[in-house]
Image (cartoon, rainbow, N blue to C red):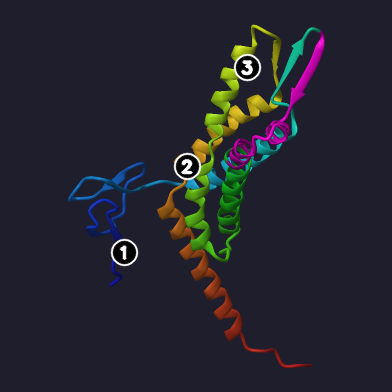
Amino acid sequence: MPVAPLIACPECDLLQAETPLPPRRTACCRRCGVALYRSTSHSLDRSLAFSLAAVVLLVIANMLPIAGLDVRGQHTETTLWGAVQALYDQDRVAVSVLVFVTTLFAPATELCIMLYMLLPLRLGQVPRHLSLAFRLAPIAREWGLVDVFMLGVVVSLIKLGNLAIVVPGIALWSFGVLILLLTAIGASFDAREFWLRADANRAALERSASGSAARPLEPAT
């Protein structure tokens, strides 16, 4: 008789047996009541779709201008990378590095990790160093502060509205949608389904490998 897998409560460490859940229901700890896992379907596929869309928007947001300024007939515009370079040229190295890490490096790292984990699983494979990638993803997410950057940009553009004509660029809207997609990735990602999918793929690959090894060789004609 198969034994039900055990799950540890993240708050009180109580070990409990997993039970099947109806759709859209949540299992809670019997001691402290914290949510243990949910009954979700296709959450990893949604996370993968959100990650692919976020990669496209991240590329657009860094290639096109954030905003343009018209001052006395002169038009100037800049990209996010141009803003980082401008801060560096003004000897604000610490600020430029902080902007680069929180708005470029960290979001790009998080999306690369998500694609590294989810795309092979969707294709029936199991990537190497899966546990390491799983631990690095939350760290990259904590360092991604695109929402804080967007808030500062919007406040700055509002203040500059009295001095110049502000023309929002496509990158500004791309960053806005990117924030929503990054939030959707974190909300839709189900760690329990993730590891169940990884174990299922690993078992399928092992059965396929053992079946291929056990197949007898055909005699030569």
Q: What range is drawn magenta here?
A: 73-101
Amino acid type of disc 3? Leu
- Residue 89 is inside the magenta segment: yes
The secondary structure making up most of the magenta span is helix
Q: Can you tell which quarter of the image residue 176 is in?
A: top right
What residue is at 29 percent from the left and 53 percent from the top? 10
Q: Secondary structure at mark 3?
A: helix
Name the element at disc 1: loop
Residue count near mark 1 (Cα–Cα under 10 Å), binned few <14, some 14–19, many ≥20: few
Residue 150 appears in the picture as rendered? yes
The amino acid type of the residue labelled 1 equals Pro
Q: Using the image as rendered, state which of residue 130 and residue 156 is in the foreground.
A: 156
Q: CA distance from mark 1 to mark 2?
A: 25 Å
Along the viewing direction, whichever of 103 and 117 lies nearer the viewer: 103
* Mark 1 in CB contact with mark 2 (< 8 angstroms): no
Disc 3 residue crowd, few under 14, some 14–19, many 20+, Cα 10 Å: some
Q: Disc 2 or disc 3, which is closer to the eye?
A: 3
Residue at 52%, 64% in the rendered image: 201
Which is more N-terminal, label 2 or label 1? 1
**Residue appearing at x 23%, y 50% in the figure:** 29
Query: The disc labelled 2 sits on which kind of residue?
Result: Gly
Marked residue nearer the N-terminal end (2 or 3)? 3
Above or below, comparing residue 190 to residue 217 in the picture: above
Per the image, the residue denoted by label 2 is 186
Crowdedness near tag 2: few (<14), some (14–19) or many (≥20) residues, C-alpha within 10 Å? few
Report the mark closest to the observer, 1 or 2: 2
Q: Earlier in the sequence, mark 3 or mark 1?
A: 1
Q: Which residue is mark 1?
A: 5
Q: What residue is disc 3 on? A: 157
Taking the magenta stretch, the answer to whether it contains residue 162 is no
